[in-house]
Image (spheres, coloured by chain):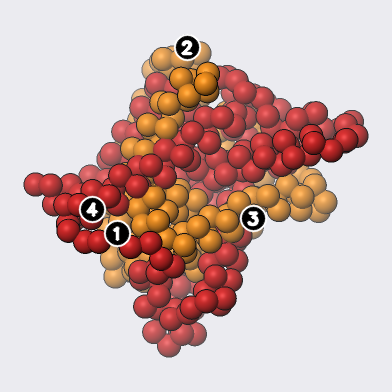
Amino acid sequence: MAESIFVNLWPGWLAGAAISALVVSMLAARNRLLSVSFCYAFLVDRVTDRLDRLKPQPVHPEMPAIPGMSVTDAPVSNPNPSGDAGIALDTHWSTAFLLGILLGGLFSGVMFRWVGGSSLAFSMAYPGFDEIWKLSGAAKTALLFGGGILVGFGTRMSGGCTSGHAIVGFPAMQKASWIAMPTFFGVGIAVTFLVRYLLGV
Amino acid sequence: MKSVKRYWTFVLFGAVFGFILSRAGATRYDVIHEMFIFSNFQLIWVIGAAVALNMIAFQLLARSRWSSANGGSIQLPNRVLHPGTFPGALLFGVGWALTGICPGTVMAQLGESGGGSSLVMIAGIFTGAWIYPKVHRRFFGWQATGCGG
């Protein structure tokens, strides 16, 4: 019983249903839409804003003094010079959410090892990736970091990721998501085939 | 800290999300890779079920005029279609295929395996998210906001 919960992967449809329940609960309980990419953007903005405020700054007339920093429970319509595609501009909850995701993964990992009986090993190993790419050291770090930049930059530019566009925007019939989701899926498929071809996999 | 009391529910929501992502296999490079070459449909089922159920849920919510427990009417998605939507998705798709991660899954992955690889990718995501506004201000400058999300 414990194995089916903590070791074996859940049936896909069940995990999907659970995610849907989570999206709806979050909306009903706290009036927030799930979109992880914005969480990173807001956190970055908050940190850079704090750092900027340490040095004397002219206030740009076309920008609000603290771009994207209003902490409010109501959705805000606000010219946002950082270019983020519109969501309640509230940074604190999103940082808490990111931390939560980390903790949830931690719980899952700990239980996986405890119930499944494997050891806790922290390393640069990236199972699945290592078998295909066979990289190490600087090359691996560079690829992972560069890929991360593409993800961070691309999701911010697009205004969402698989949570924001695919499981929230797309079901909500948002035009932007109906364009974004097939695009990143299609590109993901194409690039994967290309990579496999180039690596001779 | 006032913030802790106010935001613990979001930590909880995040934890549930991270746990589900991990148990669904979304944090595993091979599962995503195999999804892209159509040899493993696990995540198609995950996303498919979530999309189908959310479609129904959002339709019902739009018609019901419920207000959230916060007070105030429920903030339904209002994603702005803007010039960055498509090219951003292109870039994200490339990064996704190369690394096997999304912004959410990598955070769960970090918790799950504590690996240095996850940290490197997360550092990349923060860097990309940090670069973007600078590039936007310099080169793009389209208006990208609307109400809600």
Q: Chain of mark 2?
A: B
Q: Position of residue B28 (x, y in %)?
A: 35, 61
Q: Residue drawn 68% across and 50% down?
A: B130
Q: Determine if marks 1 and 4 fall on one subunit.
A: yes
**Residue position for label 2:** B71
Q: Are marks 3 and 4 on the same chain?
A: no
Seen from this angle, which residue lies furthest left? Answer: A1
Q: Nearer the viewer, mark 1 or mark 2?
A: 1
Tell me the mark number nearer the camera, choosing from 1 and 4. 1
SS class of the residue under badge 1? loop
- The subunit carrying tag 4 is A
Q: CA distance from mark 1 to mark 2?
A: 44 Å
Secondary structure at numbered mark 3: helix
- Subunit ID for the residue under disc 3: B
Measured in 3D between alpha carbons, the distance from the residue under mark 3 to the one under mark 2, in whole angstroms, is 35 Å
Q: Residue at x 59, y 58 (%)?
A: B124
- The x and y percentages for residue A126 are 40, 68
- Left or right of residue A156: residue A94: left
Which residue position holds label 1? A120
Residue at the disc numbered 4:
A112
Residue at the disc numbered 3? B128
Q: Helix, strand or loop at disc 4?
A: helix
Foreground label between 3 and 4: 4
